[in-house]
Every structure is written in C-alpha cells, then in structure tokens.
Amino acid sequence: MFGPGVNIHGGNHRTNTVGQYMKDIKKNFGDDKDVIIEDDVWIGANAIILGGRNGISIGEGSVIGAGSIVTKDVPPYCIVSGNPAKIIRKRFDESTIIMHKFLLNNKK
C-alpha cells in the first residue's frame, strides 16, 4: 500500500570523476541499483526511498512512516520512521510472525 506523494529513487550519481563537472558526468550501466519492495508493505504519505549505491530492500510486512526517508534496508515486519528512517519497533514477536504467515498461507 502506498500513501500519496511516495517517491522511490533507485539511481545514484557518480561524484568521484576527476576532471569533469558533475553535470557532465554520464551514468554507466550498473549505476542504478534495484529497489525491492516485498509483499504486504505499507508506505506512508510523502515517504522517500533512496536506492543509493547498493540498492535497497523493504522487507515483507514492514511499515514506513509518513514523511520518512529510507536509506538502508528495512528488515521484515519492522516499523521505521524518521530522517533517516530508523526502526521504531517490530510489528510482531517471532512466534506471532510464524502464526501470521501460517494464517495468511492457509487463507482460501
């Protein structure tokens, strides 16, 4: 689920090229890394996800707080918020995650 105004940026700019203005530096293949958003993720309004140099993964069942700036991987079932986004808490303890997944997988 996405709130309004969410921005996702997978790319990055090279800043280490000697002898060129930054505006003249061309991107190389592989400069843009993947942004992976797993299942059952809720991203709040105006959140910004920056893939950066290594890409980024938003784990299953996570919640990104409104207005957050995500610059690092988010583990599964975590609630993150802030600038930069930090883990506020886990949605469930480990045994509840197991039960949650079991119930989801057996819904028909």
Image: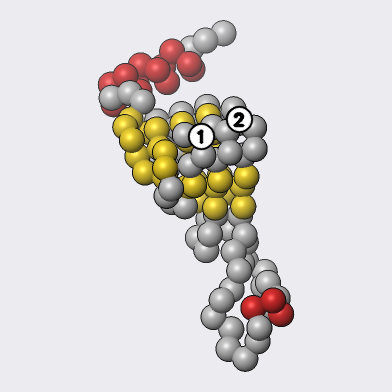
Residue for badge 2: 3
- Name the residue at 60% across, 30% down: 3
Residue 35 visible in image: yes
Amino acid type of the residue tagged 1 in the rendering: Ala
Q: Earlier in the sequence, mark 1 or mark 2?
A: 2
Q: Are marks 1 and 2 in contact (CB under 8 Å)?
A: yes
x%, y% of residue 78?
38, 33
Q: SS of the residue at dot 1?
A: loop
Spatial distance from mark 1 to mark 2, Cα to Cα?
A: 8 Å
Image mark for residue 106: none
Residue for badge 1: 66
Q: Is residue 19 left or right of residue 77?
A: right
Q: Quadrant of residue 97?
A: top left
- Name the residue at 48% across, 12% down: 106
Using a 10 Å C-alpha cutoff, classify the residue at mark 2 as few (fewer than 14 neighbours), some (14 to 19) or many (20 or more): few
Q: Is residue 33 left or right of residue 78?
A: right
x%, y% of residue 71?
47, 52
